Image (cartoon, rainbow, N blue to C red):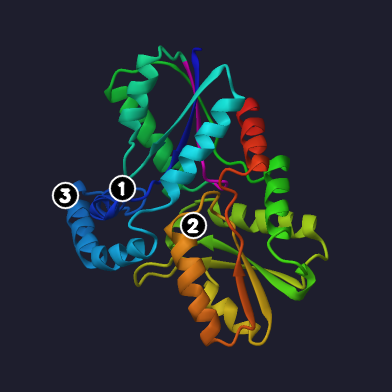
Amino acid sequence: MHKALVLLNMGGPNNLQEVEIFLKNMFKDENILPIKSELLRGFVAFMITAMRKNEAKKSYQALGGKSPLIMHTQKLVDKLQSRLVDTYVTYAMRYTPPFAKEAIKELVARNIKEVYLLPLYPHYSTTTTKSSLEDFYNTAKGLDFHARFHDIANFYENRLFNEAIIQQILRSVDNPNEYNLIFSAHSLPQKIVERGDPYLQEITEHKEILSNLLKDSFASYHLAFQSKLGPVKWLEPSLEEKLKAFKGKKVLVYPLSFVLDNSETEFELHIEYKEIAKSLGVKEYSVVECLNDSDKFVDALIDIYQRM
């Protein structure tokens, strides 16, 4: 076995002690905080972490003291490994352990010669896909690890992937035509999009693909953005603003930019926005679980891998 499939993602705290590590590493990333001076970026990252760490810890406490992302990732890796008998499957996180360095040490120990990198972001963004790939390649170079590399930028157009999403959405409620479906995507600062980041275009296209596949299954289809941070202008409309239009109506939210449940789905969407929806008079508010390790998603990832 000389081939490996490495899943890449942002990561999430494995315990409350890692919350500060997660925040600090994320905001030190030049792709997240585009400040050229490393010293200044480090200082700003320190300040943001100091301001946000206590609130963030409360969020993770509500989730049992850690992010569910690692658990879902490991289950996904196990299922993929059981199907891909000629390929070693592992994963690396960008901001929390296991980092790229640990994954590369595994690959060296197994004498891997060919590496397929699959960032688990359906839509390309410099803040996610580029950051994770860049980190892995830089780490490999630093460790003098040489292999034949393959990577993929996005996969939102993959047929099996979208079939998995449709299945997940339709089995979430009994009478879909009574619900207004909102595709909720992680927001980005508007200036990142204006610099040429294709994320907004791909998110918009994906929403249209899924809406067309679902046809008349739901009462209406909408796109909104969540997880805004800081005073700069972010992509709109926000999910809160969009929910205001559904007083007395039923709403189903699908986390469009996420494939594995994490704090932004389990806490932000399931808990925080449920309270917001209630305060706005939304009759019923529900959230679709991410694909996680569903069999259809495993099929899709294998198809994506084999096409790389």
State the residue at coordinates (59%, 23%). Answer: 84
Residue receiving disc 3: 39
Give the dominant element type of the magenta stretch: helix, strand or loop.
strand
Ranked by sequence position, the earlier of labels 2 and 3 is 3
Quarter of the figure with residue 182? bottom right
Mark 2 Cα within 10 Å, few/some/many (few <14, many 20+)? some
Q: Which of marks 1 and 3 is nearer the N terminus?
A: 1
Which residue does the numbered mark 2 point to in the structure image? Answer: 193
Q: Marks 2 and 3, Cα distance to the nearest angstrom?
A: 25 Å
Q: Name the kind of residue labelled 3 in the image.
A: Leu
Q: Looking at the image, do the residues carrying marks 2 and 3 touch, with CB atoms under 8 Å apart?
A: no
Q: What stretch is highlighted in magenta?
A: 114-123
Identified by mark 1, the residue type is Asp
Q: Is residue 263 left or right of residue 240?
A: left
Can residue 235 be seen at all in this image of the molecule?
A: no
- Quarter of the picture containing the C terminus is top right
Measured along the vertical axis of the image, is residue 232 above or below residue 44?
Answer: below
Magenta stretch contains residue 117: yes
